[in-house]
Image (cartoon, helix red, strand yellow):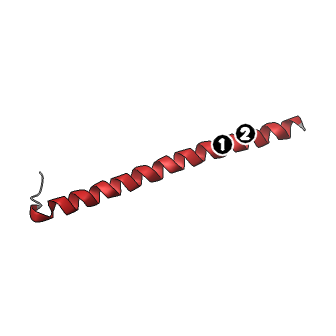
Amino acid sequence: MIPELGSYAANILAAWSIGLAVLVAIVAISIREARRTRCLLRKISDEARHD
């Protein structure tokens, strides 16, 4: 069931869209930082093994 949003439909849909975009951005940034950190830790670990 879809509720009738009336004159607030545009505002509500915009708010949901912005919220979803923010959530996607946070997840993307988190994944990017995790990959970067993993790469740095792997480099440090490799250097420690060779010393």
Q: Check the image and report above or below for 29 versus 11.
A: above
Within 10 Å of the Cα at label 2, are there few (<14), some (14-19), or many (20+) other Cα atoms? Answer: few
Amino acid type shown at disc 2: Arg
Q: The disc labelled 1 sits on which kind of residue?
A: Arg
**23 in relation to 42, above or below:** below
Q: Contact (CB < 8 A) between labels 1 and 2?
A: yes
Q: Quadrant of residue 13?
A: bottom left
- Residue 15: percent from left, percent from top: 27, 61
Label 1 element class: helix
Between 30 and 7, which is closer to the camera in this rendering? 7
- In 3D space, how far apart are the residues under numbered discs 1 and 2 (Cα atoms)? 6 Å
Q: Position of residue 41 (x, y in %)?
A: 72, 44
Q: Where does the image place residue 3, in percent across and percent down from the top left?
A: 11, 57
Instruction: Name the residue beneath numbered marker 1.
Output: 38
Q: In the picture, which quadrant includes the C terminus?
A: top right
Give the residue displayed 15% in from the left and 60% down from the top.
9
Most extreme residue toward the right is 51
User: For mark 1, does the 10 Å Cα neighbourhood hold few (<14), some (14 to 19), or many (20 or more) residues?
Assistant: few
Position of residue 2 in the picture relative to residue 35 (left or right):
left
Residue 18's place in the image compared with 48, above or below, is: below
Q: Name the element at disc 2.
A: helix
Query: Which quadrant of the view contains residue 7?
Result: bottom left
- Kindly identify the residue that appears in the image at 32 percent across and 57 percent down: 18
Q: Residue at x 87, y 35 (%)?
A: 50
Q: Which mark is residue 42?
A: 2
Q: How many marks?
A: 2
Q: Residue at x 55, y 45 (%)?
A: 32
Residue 25's mark? none
Rendering coords of residue 26 (x, y %): 46, 53
21 lies left or right of 8: right
